[in-house]
Amino acid sequence: MSAATASASSEQQPAGLSMAQVEQVRTQLQSDIEMLQSSIQRLQYAQEGFGESMLAVSRLPTNNQDNSLLVPLSSSMYVPGRLSDPDHVLVDIGTGFFVQMRPKKAQDYFKRKHDYLQVEIDKLQKVLYDKLLTRQQITGIIQMHLQQQQQQQQK
């Protein structure tokens, strides 16, 4: 094998990519991983909101004598309030639309949303896992190439 052929073959990786292309693939994978992690966090945050809403509806007073409750202004601040109609609640269904529902129906709505988000989170986590494995393989290829370069320099 001539020196030019040996040099060309050492520059090519097993997948037929040059070292620069392998680095570019690794950079793209890292970007994808960060985007997936961010998306999963946002979905988990939304899922927590539906879980809290489901819990809040389940804790509504059921007797008609005492309709007082604490209304959350934030996760740690509550103000006293009074429920004008304990048989109905307003549910924010998105984009500024509210629907009046019975508490049981609202609880079912929040559970469906919570469960749907869990399915989507699971899908994204599988994709994330696959990307992490691919990144690990790419990193192995880069390390192997660097070791080969060091061995060639030592000769």
Image (tube, grey):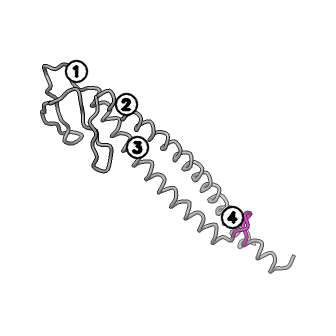
Observer-nearest of 139 and 45? 45
The residue indicated by pointer 2 is: 108
Observer-nearest of 148 and 40? 40
Residue visible at 16% across and 20% down in the picture: 64
Q: Which residues are magenta?
A: 11-17
CA gap between label 1 and label 2 equals 17 Å
Residue visible at 27% across and 49% down in the picture: 96
The residue indicated by pointer 1 is: 62
The residue indicated by pointer 4 is: 147
Mark earlier in primary sequence (3, 4): 3
Q: Quadrant of the C terminus?
A: bottom right
Callout 2 crowding tier (Cα within 10 Å): few <14, some 14–19, many ≥20: few
Callout 3 crowding tier (Cα within 10 Å): few <14, some 14–19, many ≥20: some
CA gap between label 2 and label 4 equals 58 Å
Residue most extreme to the front: 100
Q: Is residue 122 above or below residue 89?
A: below
**Label tally:** 4
63 on left or right of 112: left
Observer-nearest of 14 and 130? 130
Observer-nearest of 15 and 54? 54
* SS type, badge 3: helix
CA gap between label 3 and label 4 equals 41 Å
From the image, state whether disc 1 or disc 4 is nearer to you.
1
CA gap between label 3 and label 1 equals 30 Å
Mark earlier in primary sequence (1, 4): 1
Q: Position of residue 120 (x, y in %)?
A: 49, 44
Give the amino acid at mark 1: Thr
Mark earlier in primary sequence (1, 2): 1
Give the amino acid at mark 3: Gln
